[in-house]
Image: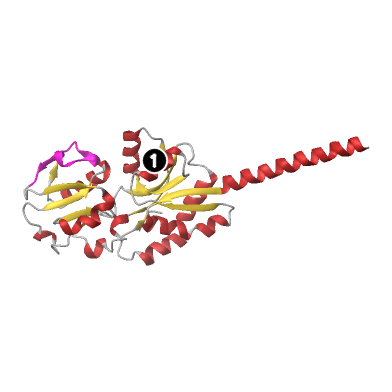
């Protein structure tokens, strides 16, 4: 009897250990680490923390202030997803770095715009003006395409979305370009004649495209901000729950009230 009792106790101990390990595994699996730039991305993520918690998912928002580290962290597995970039940027990053990032869902567009502290209308842009533009491949091309849309420059037909100043074929005003890291553009605005600034850096700097922009990207922009994940994880239930939460009426209302002047435009 004692032998049977000892065997039974051992069995219960093994079962308890198994259940404990399973719970730990489930707890770990329910944590979702998402990297994001502060505004509007992190702000939007924070709004859905409770929604995901009700589904057993603990959303951990990790803020970054540049365009490189969030992708490095995602590729290395330090985070499960990131929310800061548009699709052309991610595709370019994959090609350049040999990374394996994928689009899990589009959320919004942040129209890029040309800003200035020295002039108030585009027609006053002087000949030889110095214009600061993002130095990463896709946003640099995006900035130049914006300037081309206003007739300020003309690009080679083969340049595409990764155009650089070397692709400029016509420059009647003899504009000069300073290639600057995107995050630093608001800080150098006062030192140049104008700067093309991405929305997620313009907004925290107090710049509003519709009010302060000399030239604004159209709402039909292909540069949709996405949830990025490692390839193969697009259907992870935590990721699909996150995308669904970010495409909710709650987020639509937030965008409408927080950005009434069109600094952020939903795509869902």
Q: Quadrant of residue 202?
A: bottom left
Looking at the image, which is closer to me, 226 or 266? 226
Q: Circle 1 is placed at which residue position? A: 72
Image quadrant holding the C terminus, namely bottom left
Can residue 240 be seen by looking at this rendering? Answer: no
Please give the range of residues in magenta. 156-171
- Please indicate whether residue 119 sits to the left or right of residue 19 in the image: left
Q: Position of residue 221 (x, y in %)?
A: 29, 50
Residue at (30% x, 56% y) in the render? 201
Asked if residue 100 is positioned above or below residue 127 in the image, the reply reads above
Q: From this viewpoint, which residue is outermost toward the top?
A: 98
Looking at the image, which is closer to me, 53 or 204? 204
Q: Quadrant of residue 254?
A: bottom left
Image quadrant holding the N terminus, namely top right
Q: Secondary structure at mark 1?
A: helix
Q: Position of residue 174 (x, y in %)?
A: 7, 48
Magenta stretch: includes residue 167 = yes
Q: How many marks?
A: 1
The colour scheme is secondary structure
Asked if residue 19 is positioned above or below residue 115 in the image, the reply reads above
Magenta stretch: includes residue 65 = no
Asked if residue 51 is positioned above or below residue 23 in the image, the reply reads below
Q: Position of residue 71 (x, y in %)?
A: 38, 42
Can residue 25 be seen by looking at this rendering? Answer: yes
Classed neighbour count for the residue bearing mark 1: other residues with Cα under 10 Å, few (<14), some (14–19), many (≥20): some
- Please indicate whether residue 190 sits to the left or right of residue 28 in the image: left
Residue at (39% x, 48% y) in the render? 226
- Please indicate whether residue 90 sits to the left or right of residue 112 in the image: right
Residue at (22% x, 39% y) in the render? 160
Q: Position of residue 80 (x, y in %)?
A: 48, 44
Looking at the image, which is closer to me, 15 or 138? 15
């Amino acid at each position: 009897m004692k032998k049977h009792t000892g065997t039974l106790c051992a069995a219960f101990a093994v079962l308890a250990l198994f259940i404990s390990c399973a719970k730990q595994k489930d707890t770990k699996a329910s944590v979702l680490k998402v990297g994001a730039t502060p505004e509007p991305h992190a702000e939007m993520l924070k709004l859905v923390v409770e929604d995901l918690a009700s589904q057993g998912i603990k959303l951990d928002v990790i803020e970054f202030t540049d365009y490189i580290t969030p992708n490095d962290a995602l590729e290395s597995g330090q985070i499960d997803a990131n929310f800061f970039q548009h699709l052309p940027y991610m595709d370019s990053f994959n090609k350049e770095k040999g990374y394996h990032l994928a689009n899990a869902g589009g959320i919004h567009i942040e129209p890029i715009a040309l800003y200035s502290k020295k002039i108030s209308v585009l027609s006053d842009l002087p000949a030889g003006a110095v214009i600061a533009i993002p130095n990463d491949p896709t946003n640099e091309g995006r900035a130049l395409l914006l300037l081309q849309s206003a007739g300020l420059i003309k690009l080679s037909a083969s340049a595409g979305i990764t155009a650089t100043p070397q692709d400029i074929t016509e420059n009647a005003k003899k504009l000069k370009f300073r290639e600057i890291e995107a995050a630093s553009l608001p800080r150098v605005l006062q030192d140049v004649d104008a700067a093309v600034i991405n929305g997620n850096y313009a907004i925290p700097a107090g710049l509003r495209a519709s009010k302060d922009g000399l030239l604004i990207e159209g709402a039909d922009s292909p540069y949709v901000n996405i949830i990025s994940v490692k390839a193969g994880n697009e259907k992870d239930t935590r990721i699909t729950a996150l995308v669904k939460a970010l495409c909710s009426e709650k987020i639509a209302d937030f965008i409408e009230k927080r950005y009434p002047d069109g600094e952020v435009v939903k795509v869902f």
